[in-house]
Image (tube, rainbow, N blue to C red):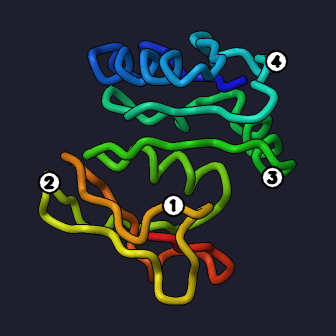
């Protein structure tokens, strides 16, 4: 099961989110919406939580479920963060895990191709390079923890 954050206080419920849901359905991936995240007792998905682009506000400020979500990730839950131009997603990760990630460059369509990091194999047998889609937001490698895995 894949949970998708659809709380309109943080995520602009627009074409991007609709496309994400259509893609999950087309891939046969079961998913459910997580719209009320103000309760400390909200139930997390069994394996994956996708956080679409946080265009409206940072989810970390006043988020009562933050310690619960951090514990879920630390226990093996996978949280997929979509980047945003304001840096809200980086702020959320920093607040939840006590990190100091900093924003890197922003790339637009075709500006760059990502190559597999020299000391890594292609991620799960993926391609050697990835084309850059529109609006790719990066994190500086130097701000990552020492044990971070950089794939592309």
The correct choice, above or below, for 98 with respect to 117 in the image is: above
Would you say 111 lies left or right of 36 here?
A: left
For disc 2, the neighbor class at 10 Å (few under 14, some 14 to 19, many from 20) is few
The correct choice, above or below, for 2 with respect to 135 in the image is: above
**Residue 47 occupies which quadrant of the picture?**
top right
For disc 1, the neighbor class at 10 Å (few under 14, some 14 to 19, many from 20) is few
Where disc 3 sits, the SS reads: helix
**Residue 119 occupies which quadrant of the picture?**
bottom right
Rendered image: mark on residue 99: none
CA gap between label 4 and label 2 equals: 39 Å
Where disc 4 sits, the SS reads: loop
Q: Residue at x 58, y 30 (%)?
A: 62
Tell me whether the residue at label 3 lies in contact with that at label 2, contact meaning CB atoms closer than 8 angstroms. no
* Residue on which disc 1 sits: 126
Which is more toward the observer, 132 or 48? 132
Q: Number of numbered discs present?
A: 4
Counting residues from the start of the chain, the first of labels 3 and 4 encountered is 4
CA gap between label 3 and label 2 equals: 32 Å
Rendered image: mark on residue 41: 4
CA gap between label 1 and label 3 equals: 25 Å
What percent of the width, then of the height, locates residue 58? 44, 36
CA gap between label 3 and label 4 equals: 18 Å
Rendered image: mark on residue 108: 2
For disc 4, the neighbor class at 10 Å (few under 14, some 14 to 19, many from 20) is few
């Amino acid at each position: 099961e894949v949970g998708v954050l659809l709380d309109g206080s943080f995520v602009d419920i627009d074409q991007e989110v609709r496309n994400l849901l259509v893609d999950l359905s087309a891939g046969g991936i079961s998913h459910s919406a997580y719209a009320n995240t103000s309760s400390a007792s909200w139930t997390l998905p069994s394996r994956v939580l996708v956080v679409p682009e946080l265009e409206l506000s940072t989810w970390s400020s006043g988020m009562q479920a933050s310690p619960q979500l951090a514990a879920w990730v630390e226990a093996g839950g996978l949280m997929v963060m979509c980047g945003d131009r304001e840096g809200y997603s980086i702020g959320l990760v920093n607040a939840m895990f006590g990190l100091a990630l900093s924003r890197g460059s922003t790339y637009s369509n075709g500006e760059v191709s990502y190559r597999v990091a020299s000391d890594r194999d292609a991620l799960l047998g993926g391609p050697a390079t990835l084309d850059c889609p529109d609006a790719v937001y990066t994190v500086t490698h130097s701000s990552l923890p020492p044990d971070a895995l950089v794939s592309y």
